[in-house]
């Protein structure tokens, strides 16, 4: 038991509070609860926390975490499930239940701040400048992670960014309280990052995200390439009942903008080009920019657009329409 206490304490000290302490907790419980859980009392960030670890190492984590309500009622205080380790499918299943848990390997899930184990909250950030293009891409990657733990390598594969850029951005998000970080793996050094509440992540970072648009260019429609994703109201029209605009809009990267031909002919059909601060193709899908970029490239506001946005983005937990 002392080894378990030491392991839990080390995990909390490494990931949450270097002054965290853990001790065995002895209370009178029903025969069922006493045989089902070992209890520990942790002092973390000047707050007391009860950790309940299943006595059966092979117990179903889902059933174990469902017993937290009964345990909390018996203790008259909240208890968080603690496991030696969890597989990725098990973590995803527990996250769906919305109950907080931790593992000795360093995984934490704290939905809706039901347990406060972070020194910073994800309130809107007061910033003097927006995220840089790299940080914007990493933010999008995290936003669309579907509450699944991601690694630095995952982000690199999806964005094509360098390891140093990704590592710096992820570390900054953790520092700002936007991401939860855990350390595990065979070597005990592999970092895993989690967006535990996507709406909270969005609220906490959208002010710092800023605009993805570096400049807007009106150009002849003849310059448009087939691989340029539509943006703004053109993208919204494809996802809703909104009529497409007379002049379609597309998103391009800074590199593509530098290659635009010089065409001066007012008689030609025109289009709007949103020159983004990053490559829009990274998260484009079905010929459209990603949902957040679409939202941020719409510069008009009226009731019909509001209705169309709710229709197109209503299924996203982060959307604040």
Image (spheres, grey):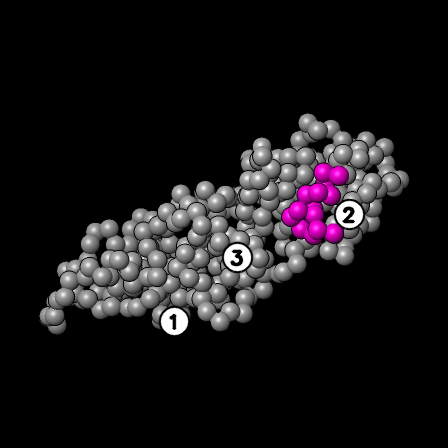
Q: Mark 2 points at which residue?
A: 21
The correct choice, above or below, for 171 with respect to 276 in the image is above
Q: Residues within 10 Å of mark 3 (few under 14, many from 20)?
A: some
Residue displayed at 63% across by 60% down? 120
> Which numbered disc, 1 or 3, marks the residue that appears first in the sequence?
3
* Element under disc 3: helix
Asked if disc 2 and disc 1 are in contact, CB closer than 8 Å, the reply is no
Q: Is residue 222 left or right of residue 168?
A: left
Q: Quadrant of residue 248?
A: bottom left
Q: Name the residue under label 1.
A: 301
Secondary structure under the numbered disc 2 in the rendered image: strand
Separation of disc 3 and disc 2 at Cα?
27 Å
The residue that label 3 is drawn on is 172
Q: Which of marks 2 and 1 is in front?
A: 2
Q: Is residue 54 magenta?
A: no
Q: How crowded is mark 1: few (under 14 residues within 10 Å), some or many (20 or more)?
A: few
Look at the numbered discs 1 and 3 and tell me whether their residues touch, using CB distance below 8 Å.
no
Which of labels 1 and 3 is toward the front?
3
> Mark 2: few, some, or many residues within 10 Å (few <14, many ≥20)?
some
- What residue lies at 43% left-to-right and 47% top-to-bottom? 163
Looking at the image, which is closer to me, 25 or 18?
A: 18
- Magenta-colored span: 6-19
Where, quadrant-wise, is the N terminus in this rendering? top right
Report whether residue 216 is seen: yes
Q: Which residue is drawn at 32% across and 51% down?
A: 281
């Amino acid at each position: 038991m002392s080894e378990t206490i030491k392991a839990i304490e080390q995990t909390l000290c490494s990931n949450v509070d270097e002054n965290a302490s853990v001790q065995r907790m002895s209370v009178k419980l029903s025969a069922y609860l006493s045989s089902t859980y070992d209890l520990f009392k942790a002092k973390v960030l000047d707050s007391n926390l009860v950790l309940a670890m299943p006595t059966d190492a092979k117990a179903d984590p889902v059933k174990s975490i469902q017993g937290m309500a009964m345990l909390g009622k018996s203790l008259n205080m909240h208890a968080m499930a603690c496991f030696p380790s969890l597989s990725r499918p098990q973590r995803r299943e527990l996250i769906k239940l919305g109950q907080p848990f931790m593992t000795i390997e360093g995984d934490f899930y704290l939905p809706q701040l039901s347990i406060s184990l972070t020194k910073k909250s994800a309130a809107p950030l007061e910033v003097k400048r927006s995220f840089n293009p790299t940080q914007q891409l990493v933010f999008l990657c995290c936003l669309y992670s579907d509450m699944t733990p991601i690694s630095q390598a995952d982000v690199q594969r999806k964005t094509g960014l360098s390891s140093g850029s990704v590592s710096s951005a992820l570390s900054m998000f953790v520092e700002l309280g936007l991401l939860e970080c855990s350390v595990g793996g065979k070597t005990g050094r592999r970092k895993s990052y989690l967006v535990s509440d996507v709406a909270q992540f969005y609220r906490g970072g959208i002010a710092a995200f800023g605009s993805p648009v570096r400049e807007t260019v009106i150009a002849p429609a003849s310059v448009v390439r087939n691989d340029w994703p539509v943006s703004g109201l053109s993208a919204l029209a494809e996802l809703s009942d909104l009529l497409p605009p007379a002049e379609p809009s597309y998103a391009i990267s800074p590199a593509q903008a530098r290659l635009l031909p010089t065409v001066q002919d007012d008689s030609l059909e025109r289009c709007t080009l949103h020159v983004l601060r990053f490559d829009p193709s990274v998260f484009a899908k079905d010929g459209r920019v990603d949902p957040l970029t679409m939202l941020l490239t719409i510069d008009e506001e009226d009731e019909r657009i509001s209705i169309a946005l709710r229709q197109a983005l209503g299924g996203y937990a982060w959307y604040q329409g």
